[in-house]
Image (cartoon, rainbow, N blue to C red):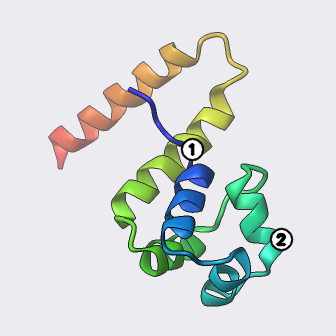
Amino acid sequence: MQVSSLGSLIRNKREEKKLLMRELASKIDVDTSMISKIENGYRSPTKEQLDKIASVLNINNEQLINIWFAERIYNDLKEQSNSLDILKIVEERIKEKNTND
């Protein structure tokens, strides 16, 4: 399954809505260079910015949050040779937590 990057998803949705970077930036209270950095993968938006982006671009907030967290985890683990083992441990801990809730 091909997963689009957060930046490409935001860029594609912004372009579909025919918004310029500066227009999106204005609507979410950041400068245009921040939007450029987000779209090009050089910066990650804050959770608050992500919520605003979802609202302005009519993107499912849960979808954006999932991609946002996935990118954060990927960036933390991409240099680890045992990253899949780490993810399995995390998965087990989450399953255990959900079972106890």
Please tell me which residue is depicted at 51% across the width and 41% down the height of the picture: 4
Marks 1,2: beta carbons within 8 A: no
- Counting other residues with Cα less than 10 Å from the Cα at mark 1, is it few (<14), some (14-19), or many (20 or more)? some
Looking at the picture, how far across and down is residue 12, in whole percent? Answer: 54, 58
- Assign a secondary structure to mark 2: helix
> Which quarter of the rendered picture does the N terminus lie within?
top left
Q: Which label's residue is closer to the chain start, 1 or 2?
A: 1
Quadrant in the rendering for residue 11 = bottom right
Q: Is residue 40 above or below residue 82?
A: below
- Assign a secondary structure to mark 1: loop
Q: CA distance from mark 1 to mark 2?
A: 18 Å
- Please indicate whether residue 6 sits to the left or right of residue 60 in the image: right
Residue at which label 1 appears: 5
Looking at the picture, how far across and down is residue 43, in whole percent? Answer: 75, 56
Q: Is residue 30 above or below residue 62?
A: below
Please tell me which residue is depicted at 55% across the width and 69% down the height of the picture: 14
Please tell me which residue is depicted at 25% across the width and 33% down the height of the picture: 95
Residue type beneath disc 2 = Ser
Near-viewer residue (16 or 46) = 16
Looking at the picture, how far across and down is residue 85, in whole percent? Answer: 49, 14
Near-viewer residue (92 or 2) = 2
Near-viewer residue (58 or 15) = 15
Residue type beneath disc 1 = Ser
Please tell me which residue is depicted at 45% across the width and 72% down the height of the picture: 54
Residue 15: numbered disc: none
Q: Residue furthest right?
A: 33
Q: Is residue 23 above or below residue 1?
A: below
- Counting other residues with Cα less than 10 Å from the Cα at mark 2, is it few (<14), some (14-19), or many (20 or more)? few
Residue at which label 2 appears: 33
